[in-house]
Image (spheres, rainbow, N blue to C red):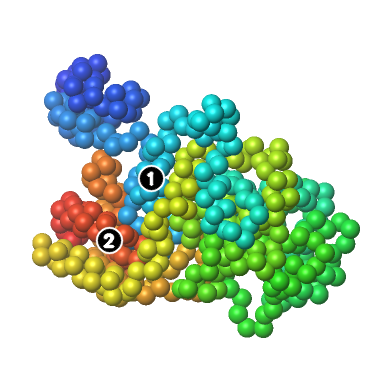
Amino acid sequence: MVALVDVRRLTPRTDAVLADPRLAAAEHRLGRAIVLSAVRRAQDRARAGEIEPAAVPDAAVESLPSHAATLTPVINATGVLLHTNLGRAPLSAAARDALQAAAGSTDLEFDLASGQRGRRGRGMLSALSAAVPAAEAVHVVNNNAAALVLAATALAAGREVVVSRGELIEIGDGFRLPDLLESTGARIREVGTTNRTTAADYAAAIGPQTAFVLKVHPSNYRIEGFTASASIAELAALSVPVIGDIGSGLLTPHPLLPAEPDASSWLTAGAAVVTASGDKLLGGPQAGLLAGRADLIARLARHPLARALRVDKLTAAALEATLTGPRPPVAEQLAAPQAELAGRADLIADALAAVGIDARAQGCEAAVGGGGAPGVSLPSAAVSLPAELAAELRSGLAVRRGAMPAVVGRTEDGRLLLDLRAISPADDQRLTAAVRSAAAADPAAAG
Ligand SMILES: *Cc1c(COP(=O)(O)O)cnc(C)c1O
C-alpha cells in the first residue's frame, strides 16, 4: 500500500511529460488530443506499477500512433484480391500521387484558363468516357449501391422495376438489393424463378407502370445445373430501357474472367445504362460508375439526389489516375503467373528460415473476392508459418506503433498462410521485415 502511494506521487505531471521535445513535436504532427491520451496511458501504467515513473515519457512516445487517423496499413496476405474488410482495391502509385496532389485546394469545378466555374470532375468523367467508348455519357457517384439508388429514384420512383428472382441478391453485410431499390419508392416486379428466367417472363410483366428492366450480375454466387437467364440483347429488344448492374467494374472483357460481364459488352448488346463499382476489378477508389444513354445519364446527373451522392475531389483524382495511369495493383495481381508467385514465396521463406523461423513455401489457391468471380480459383503460392504468429503479425506492438504494417493471412490446416497473390512484389521486403519483427517479439511462436 505504501509503495503504491509512493509510485502515484512519483508519476510525473502531465505538463512536465508534454514538455518532452519528442511529444511537443508529435503534438504538431498529430494534434494535442492524441498526444495527451498517449501520456495518460503511460501515466496509468506507471500508477499501476507496470513501468517506472521515470519511463513515462518514453512509454508515451512509444505508444504514439504513426498517423492522426486510426486506419492502419495492412499487407493483404489473405489470398483474396478484393477483400471488403481490408478496403477492397489498393490504389496504384499514380492514383495515390493524384489524390495527394488534389488534397489541398484544387480546380475541381473551376476553369483555370478562363477563371470561371468549370464542370466538376471533368478530368475523371472524360477519362471514364474514353475508357468506355460505347457509352454516350457517364456519371460517377459514391459507390455502386448509390448508382442503383440514383437510377431507381430518378427513373422509377412510384413505378415498377422488373427484376429476375434469380438476381435479387444480398450485396453483403445484410444489405439486400430489393430493400435498397424499394427504399427509393420504386416497386419491384419479380419475374421468373430462382434458377430460370426467360425473356418471355420479362415481356409478360412489362406494362404501363414499368420504368425499366434491371439486370443484375449475381456476382457473389453461382447457380449451376438447370438454369436459364435472358441475355442483355434479348432484354434490349423489349419496350423499356435495360439498366445493367455488372458489379465488379470491368470496363472491357477480361481474358482470365470470361464469366464476368463488362460495361462495354453490355452497352454494345443494348443496355441503356450500366452501373459498376470503382473499387473492385477496376482497381480504383470506392465509386459508383454509371455509363450509357445520354438522355438517361443527364436525368440522373440532374436529379436532386445526385448532389447527395457526388464524389469528392480525392475520389475524382484517384479514379481519373486509375483510368489513365498504369495497370492498377489488382490487375497486375490478377495476371501474375503462378510460377512468379512461387519464386517469390521461395525467396521469402528462405530468408525467414535462414534466421531460424519455421517458414516454408507452398502452393495454394487464391480468390478474386469482393463479390466477384465466384467459383474462380486462382493458382497461387504462400509462405507457411506457425499459426501462433498470426496475432503478433496482425496487431503486435510494432504494428500498433506504426513501425510495421499489419499482416493479415489465413489459417489452413493449423498453419498461417501468407498468400502472395494479393501482394505486390514491391511489398515483399516489407512483408519479410514484418514477419521477422513478429518472430523477434514472440520467439516461442516462431520456431
Ligand atoms: C459489389 C456489388 C454491388 C455493391 O457495390 P458497392 O460499390 O459496394 O456499393 C452491387 N451490385 C453488385 C452486382 C455487386 O457485385
Relative vertical location of residue 324 with respect to residue 21 in this rendering, above or below = below
Indicate left or right for 80 with 211 as reference: left
Q: Is residue 218 visible?
A: no
Amino acid type, residue under disc 2 in the picture: Pro
| N-terminal-most mark, 1 or 2 | 1
Q: Nearer the viewer, residue 118 or 407?
A: 118
> For residue 416, what is the image quadrant?
bottom left
Callout 2: 10 Å neighbours few (<14), some, many (20+)? some
Which quarter of the figure is the N terminus placed in?
top left
Residue 65 position in % (x across, y down): 29, 36
Residue at 60% x, 80% y: name it: 224
Q: Which residue appears farthest toward the right when viewing the image?
A: 208
Residue 403 position in % (x across, y down): 23, 43
Residue at 38% x, 38% y: name it: 100
Give me the C-alpha separation between circle 1 and circle 2: 18 Å
Residue at 71% x, 71% y: name it: 233
Residue 313 position in % (x across, y down): 50, 37
Amino acid type, residue under disc 1 in the picture: Arg
Relative vertical location of residue 209 with respect to residue 403 in this rendering, above or below = below
Residue 142 position in % (x across, y down): 57, 45
Which quarter of the figure is the C terminus placed in?
bottom left
Q: Nearer the viewer, residue 411 or 119?
A: 119
**Image mark for residue 425:** 2
Callout 1: 10 Å neighbours few (<14), some, many (20+)? some
Residue at 54% x, 52% y: name it: 128
- SS at circle 1: helix
Q: Are marks 1 and 2 in contact (CB under 8 Å)?
A: no
Relative vertical location of residue 75 with respect to residue 385 in this rendering, above or below = above
> For residue 66, what is the image quadrant?
top left
Residue under pointer 1: 96
